[in-house]
Amino acid sequence: MSSIKCIDLFCGAGGLTHGLLLEGIKVIAGIDIDPLSRHAYEINNGAHFIQQDITRTDPEELQNLYGSAEIRILAGCAPCQPFSTYAQRYDTKSKPEWRLLREFARLIDTIKPEIVTMENVPTLERHEVYMDFKSKLERLGYFVWQGIVDCASYGLPQNRRRLVLLASRLERIDFVEPTHKDNPMTVHDAIGSLPPINAGETHPSDPLHTASRLSPLNLERIRASKPGGTWRDWPEKLVAKCHKRNSGKTYASVYGRMEWDKPSPTLTTQFYGFGNGRFGHPQQDRAISLREGAILQGFPPTYSFLPEGTPVHFKTLGRMIGNAVPVTLGRVIGRTIAQHLEITPKPTQNVKSYVSRKTELTADVQT
Ligand SMILES: C[S@@+](CC[C@H](N)C(=O)[O-])C[C@H]1O[C@@H](n2cnc3c(N)ncnc32)[C@H](O)[C@@H]1O
């Protein structure tokens, strides 16, 4: 049990950790600066949450956590906002988040874990900070795989493309093949059976199955919206002034409804707002609920995000859920690592028995 251990940097609510655990990768700890993530991270994953700014993380502290593990996995999904398409339009270079990938590299440089994994938005690939990160791994002797992963091709009911990097000091590592290329999971598969609620309502049996309020104007607008359509379907009187201007003609991707028979659009941290994207429910006159967003991110329907009785704030929960690595992608990364370790000459007897431990580790996870 002690031979393969993973530490998840920037662990948030634990999307990546949960996926790795479900594939039998033992995650012992997650580090994140946000204390609000502690509950979700610990209760669903049984891993230790360390509230810390990564810029202050001492590599020796991480090495102590790994103890005598022979395969040390270091995962890290730094915040992606400075690299997102939206942020590219502004000068965000001065933002401290740019440094965080360098901080990840600093920890790798000292610890030299056997396996490293990183996820971020596809546009990061073009940035110097990422090129430096990758070439540092290569200089350190890692075999590096990188690619833009289409999460819908792996069974996530959401169109979400992400840059994934996997690096191994053992031997060449290749990402597993897509499983759902021609048969993607749909919005209906994911949330079709949830009980109906109105805008501004919370279901009595699940505080997260809550939908944000709609103003009388937005209620009229969603009633006039078609699944997969845009505000162009509305009668003239409902169209916002900014959309009528020439400069607004490009904003077709706001105020839309999802379609039952397709994967959802990419969720952002504001997926709970009808005006923030194509986040309208396919049938009910409201934006999707926080729970529906979590399920579209691959979280099991019972994943607990807050201690019982804690007030639910859309902004906080939207950030935790929308920023997560989809659990489905976490599983695919976990499966890739697991397959890689099984085909690699194992250094010790402990590592050889890795496969038989899978069931035991998976059983630790609450689903
Ligand atoms: C993209 S999210 C990570 C999502 C997470 N891996 C998951 O799968 O749910 C980025 C996380 O980085 C955290 N973060 C931002 N700056 C940080 C810092 N300086 N040190 C540690 N964590 C930080 C944020 O609180 C946020 O939870």
Image: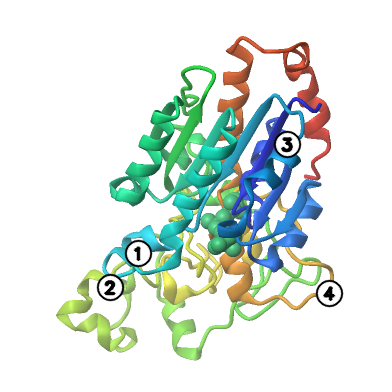
Q: CA distance from mark 4 to mark 1?
A: 38 Å
Q: What residue would you read off at disc 4?
A: 309
Q: Can you tell which mark lies on residue 42? A: none
Give the mark nearest the N terminus, 3 or 2.
3
Which mark, residue 232?
2
Badge 4: how crowded within 10 Å, few (<14), some, or many (20+)?
Answer: few
Tell me if residue 179 can be seen. Answer: no
Q: Nearer the viewer, residue 57 or 92?
A: 57
Q: Earlier in the sequence, mark 3 or mark 4?
A: 3
- x and y percent of residue 102 in the render? 45, 50
Q: CA distance from mark 1 to mark 2?
A: 8 Å
Q: Quadrant of residue 93?
A: bottom left
C-alpha separation, residue under disc 2 versus residue under disc 4: 41 Å
Give the residue drawn at x 58%, y 68%.
318
Towards the viewer: 176 or 264: 176
Where does ligand 1 appear, by image quarter? bottom right
Mark 1 nearby-residue class (10 Å; few <14, some 14–19, many ≥20): some
Residue type beneath disc 4: Gly
Would residue 238 be visible to someone looking at this image? yes
Contact between marks 2 and 4 (CB within 8 A): the answer is: no
User: Mark 2 and mark 1 in contact (Cβ < 8 Å)?
Assistant: yes
Q: Amino acid at mark 1?
A: Gly
Distance Cα–Cα, label 3 vs label 1:
51 Å
Q: Nearer the viewer, mark 2 or mark 4?
A: 4
Name the image quarter holding the N terminus.
top right
Residue topped by disc 1: 229
